[in-house]
Image (cartoon, rainbow, N blue to C red):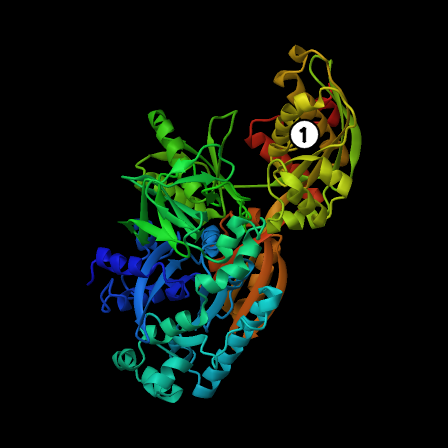
């Protein structure tokens, strides 16, 4: 086995040759074989033995990943390969496939120029297959296809060679339909995968064999020969004549772009600054001699070095001592060390030029999605996560002396994974941790116990709801407690087009900065006068100052924003987050003496007016829903339909393939937390396989809302009876 330091030494020699670099991710639905395939590439690069490839799961380096044999976080590794007598670097990211950890996939897509989509042909296109492909298309990362576990078609389904080819061609066609649907318009045709072009490979990563048009031509083998060897179980012979890397590596190097080819079309998509500026030209040209610009797409922690930022460098060079700006941060950060990630390990190097991935130590204030630059530039587009936290647990330290340790651990975990949301319940002092699902929270709890050595107590899972309105209300008069200042507000629902823009990340949270932010609001569907008056965006809600000539308005604006953000963070109905509100201040009377218009006066005034407006408009509770794909033998179909409907689920599509039925249904998250798994297994005698993905928030049935609101208020220690608008206007 080759020492990692030696591999990195060889890799650093190639980092400046952009033609020889490929930044890629391996993406797939859970258990379709990403990490197993990665092992084979590591073995080819000499980092692990070929004998253990597929079993060691090298990039699943955390103990919890090894125990569960599941990728939980993205792992980056740089590999050196020789192809056609030329040396190449492949900076590879192995990503998770489970929906609860989809945030890692989203962030990784910002860093790569291409992806290897792995699909199991027996299961076919699964929900997360479509999701991860959509994520890659959104970030303009070009795909190639590896059909893994091809032997299952022969050994399990007992298909003939003709039926196998028919199945594989249908799968390729299904993938291409998704590419056509989600790819940037100009690449919808050219990015389609094809056996003839060599951008599709078939094989078995676990058995370490694969074929593609390129490898079959090179080794003079036929599909019929492969079929016969597979049926005879001659795995060793298959590995000898068709090693997996001989099919996958040419596909990556020949069909996925290098940084020089990708950045000219990716940069205008990811960065909306002036492309004719010095920074714009440097990033388009991947100019290593220019000022340094890049984006942080990951944060990890090292027990010796502390916080480590993982960045894609678009121009310039990162090296020890370089001072960089972080978007939105006042002070520059000095790089203390630069390294290359080798999964669990990090090898320190002198410098890393544009077009590569880099580990940066010293970026202590960094967050995922931050733009790094030598000179201040327009930030990159926000990294938008498709799923939203839908389940919460209250977590506290068993020993109160560990409370500070718990707070620090949760801070680290939420920085490493921004899809974890942590906040303190001001009434109970509990830490409320929200995640993508039960498994996500279970992993967090396990890490707190095993890695941070904190004994914790946690509550049963709680569903995360949202509050919104469906009609306009106001003007509502909000008075300060001393009655010296008054604010008149209207509250109305935001147009659906604006909510879609939030989902797509084209509207940023915080105070709009510059004409670009205003134009984004107008493009999303806000009227120009309203867009120009927006002063804050928080929790997918907007505050607008529509007043004209009101004295002292500028002096209290920060306090008005604070009060608005408090109101939309904890709505009036059930103290759940609000979403989809446009709150407009249309008039105000403000006391001239600063003593009478401090935080204790202004914040309650605007908060109370906002609450009263929401309740007057008719506060509606939205509940999170998930799409479930349930695969079962045909004989259990009626049982499952009844089961889904008994839990307020809506059956969408039902497809049958021989004796197997696939049911797609949309279900409220609340109905999947009460013995769902056990009941579903019971209905099918343990033969059901299911997957879920986030399906957004929808209005709760009116007849259920009052009951659920009372339950939430009781749990939070509030009076069970919801307040009226007058309660906030006294």
Q: What element carries label 1?
A: loop
Q: In this view, does 101 lie to the left or right of 239?
A: right
Front residue of this view, candidates 708 and 195: 195
311, above or below 17, in the image:
above
Which residue occupies the foreground of this view, 565 or 520?
520
The answer to which of 178 and 715 lies nearer the viewer is 178
Can residue 180 be seen here? Answer: yes
**Vertical order, 113 against 582 (above or below):** below
Q: Name the side, left or right, on which 537 lies relative to 122.
A: right
Q: Quadrant of the N terminus?
A: bottom left
What is the x, y in percent for residue 728?
Answer: 70, 23
- The quadrant holding residue 490 is top right
Quadrant where the C terminus lies? Answer: top right
Q: Can residue 131 be seen in this view?
A: no
In percent of the image, x 33 and y 34: which residue is there? 455
| Image coordinates for residue 315, horizontal then vertical, percent | 44, 52
Q: Going by the image, does 572 lie left or right of 200? A: right
Residue shown at the point (72%, 35%) measured from the top left: 533
Q: Mark 1 points at which residue?
A: 722
Q: Is residue 96 left or right of residue 490?
A: left
């Amino acid at each position: 086995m080759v020492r990692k330091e030696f591999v990195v030494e060889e890799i650093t020699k190639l980092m400046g040759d952009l033609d020889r670099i490929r930044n890629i991710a391996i993406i797939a639905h859970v258990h379709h074989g990403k990490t197993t395939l990665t092992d084979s590439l590591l073995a080819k690069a000499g980092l692990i033995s070929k004998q253990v490839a597929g079993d060691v799961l090298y990039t699943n380096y955390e103990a919890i990943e090894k125990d569960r044999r599941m990728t939980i976080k993205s792992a980056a590794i740089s590999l050196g390969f020789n192809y056609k007598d030329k040396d190449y670097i492949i900076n590879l990211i192995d990503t998770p496939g489970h929906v609860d950890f989809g945030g890692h996939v989203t962030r990784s897509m910002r860093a790569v120029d291409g992806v290897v989509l792995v699909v199991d042909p027996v299961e076919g296109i699964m929900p997360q297959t479509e999701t991860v492909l959509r994520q890659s298309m959104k970030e303009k990362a070009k795909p190639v296809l590896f059909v893994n576990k091809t032997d299952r078609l022969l050994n399990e389904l007992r298909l003939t060679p003709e039926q196998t080819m028919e199945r594989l061609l249908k799968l390729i066609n299904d993938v291409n339909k998704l590419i056509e649907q989600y790819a940037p318009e100009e690449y919808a045709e050219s990015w389609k995968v094809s056996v003839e072009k060599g951008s599709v490979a078939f094989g078995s990563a676990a058995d370490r064999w694969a074929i593609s048009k390129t490898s079959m031509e090179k080794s003079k083998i036929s599909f019929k020969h492969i079929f016969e060897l597979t049926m005879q179980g001659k795995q060793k012979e298959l590995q000898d004549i068709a090693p997996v890397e001989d099919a996958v590596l040419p596909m990556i190097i020949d069909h996925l772009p290098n940084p020089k080819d990708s950045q000219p079309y990716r940069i205008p998509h990811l960065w909306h600054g002036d492309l004719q500026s010095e920074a714009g030209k440097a990033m388009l040209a991947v100019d290593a001699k220019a000022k340094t610009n890049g984006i942080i797409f990951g944060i990890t922690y090292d027990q010796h070095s502390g916080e480590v930022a993982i960045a894609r460098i678009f121009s310039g060079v990162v090296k020890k001592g370089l001072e960089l700006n972080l978007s939105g941060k006042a002070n520059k950060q000095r790089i203390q060390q630069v390294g290359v990630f080798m999964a669990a390990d990090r090898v320190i190097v002198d410098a890393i030029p544009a077009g590569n991935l880099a580990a940066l130590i010293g970026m202590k204030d960094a967050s995922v999605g931050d733009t790094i630059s030598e000179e201040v530039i327009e930030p990159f587009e926000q990294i938008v996560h498709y799923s939203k936290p839908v389940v919460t647990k209250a977590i506290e330290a068993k020993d109160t002396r560990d409370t500070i340790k718990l707070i620090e651990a949760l801070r680290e975990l939420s920085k490493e994974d921004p899809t974890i949301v942590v906040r303190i319940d001001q009434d109970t002092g509990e830490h409320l941790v929200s995640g993508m699902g039960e498994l996500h929270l279970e992993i967090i709890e396990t890490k707190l116990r095993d890695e941070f050595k904190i004994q914790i107590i946690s509550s049963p899972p709680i569903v995360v709801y949202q509050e919104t309105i469906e009609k306009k209300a106001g003007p509502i008069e909000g008075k300060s407690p001393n009655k010296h200042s008054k604010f008149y507000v209207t509250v109305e629902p935001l147009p659906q087009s604006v909510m879609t823009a939030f989902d797509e990340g084209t509207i940023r949270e915080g105070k709009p900065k510059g004409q670009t932010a205003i134009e984004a609001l107008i493009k999303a569907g806000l009227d120009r006068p309203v867009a120009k008056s927006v002063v804050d965006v928080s929790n997918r809600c907007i505050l607008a100052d529509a007043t004209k000539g009101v004295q002292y308005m500028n002096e209290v604006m920060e306090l008005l924003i604070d009060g608005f953000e408090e109101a939309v963070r904890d709505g009036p109905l059930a103290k759940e987050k609000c979403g989809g509100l446009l709150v407009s201040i249309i008039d105000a009377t403000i006391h001239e003496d600063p003593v009478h218009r401090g935080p204790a006066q202004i914040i309650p005034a605007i908060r109370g007016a906002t609450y009263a407006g929401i309740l007057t408009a008719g506060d509606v509770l939205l509940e999170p829903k998930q799409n479930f794909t349930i695969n079962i033998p045909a004989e259990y179909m009626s049982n499952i339909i009844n089961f889904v409907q008994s839990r307020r689920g809506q059956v969408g599509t039902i497809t049958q393939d021989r004796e197997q039925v696939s049911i797609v249904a949309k279900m409220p998250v609340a109905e999947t937390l009460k013995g769902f798994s056990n009941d579903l297994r019971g209905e099918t005698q343990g033969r059901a396989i299911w997957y879920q993905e986030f399906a957004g928030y929808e209005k709760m049935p009116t007849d259920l809302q009052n009951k659920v609101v009372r339950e939430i208020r009781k749990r939070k220690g509030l009076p069970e009876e919801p307040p009226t608008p007058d309660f906030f206007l006294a």
